[in-house]
Image (cartoon, rainbow, N blue to C red):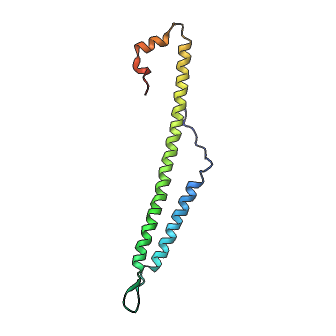
Amino acid sequence: MTPPATQTAGPGSWFRPLLTILLLGLSVWWLALVALRLGLEPRTDDAGNVVLDEFQRTKDILLVVLPLTTTALGYWFGAQGKTEAEAKAVEAEKEATQANAALTAVVDSSSVPHLLTQARKNYPQAFEKR
């Protein structure tokens, strides 16, 4: 088994953390603004109708901010797992190629004629397509 491959930074490796930091910064800023205005009483007009209700606006803002925050975090952690899985897949593909090359070398260097045909006949499950 070969040692794990080191991961190199791709051309867009700066984009994911930057996007996450921007979205989280926007969320914190927005929540701070909401917290400053949360305790204000609703404004009413002369007829007693509510013109501006800070609690309602706060709820509406949270309906926008929280999905943005969870999307940023979910994207960050989901993409990180994808990168690791892709690196492992590349390593497994390299190992399979090396094993195939070694098997081909053994079969080609054998003095037994039609060794591959005999192996296919004796072990058909090893030659099945997956």
Task: Look at 60% across and 54% down and name the residue there.
Answer: 14
Task: Look at 45% across and 76% down and name the residue there.
Answer: 35
Count every numbered label the image shows and give the total. Answer: 0
Residue 53 position within the rendered picture, expressed as x and y whole percent measured from the top left: 41, 81
Residue lying farthest to the left in this orientation: 48
Does 18 sit left or right of 61 as displayed? right
Displayed quadrant of residue 127: top left
Does 120 sit left or right of 7 as displayed? left
Whether residue 80 is situated above or below residue 6 in the rendered picture: below
Residue 2 position within the rendered picture, expressed as x and y whole percent measured from the top left: 54, 31
Task: Look at 51% across and 38% down and name the residue there.
Answer: 88
Residue 10 position within the rendered picture, expressed as x and y whole percent measured from the top left: 61, 47
Whether residue 124 is situated above or below residue 85 in the rendered picture: above
Whether residue 55 is situated above or below residue 86 in the rendered picture: below
Task: Look at 52% across and 45% down and name the residue there.
Answer: 83
Residue lying farthest to the bottom in this orientation: 46
In which quadrant will I find the C terminus? top left
Nearer to me, 99 or 1? 99
Residue 9 position within the rendered picture, expressed as x and y whole percent measured from the top left: 61, 47
Residue lying farthest to the front in this orientation: 47
Whether residue 116 is situated above or below residue 49 in the rendered picture: above
Displayed quadrant of residue 64: bottom left
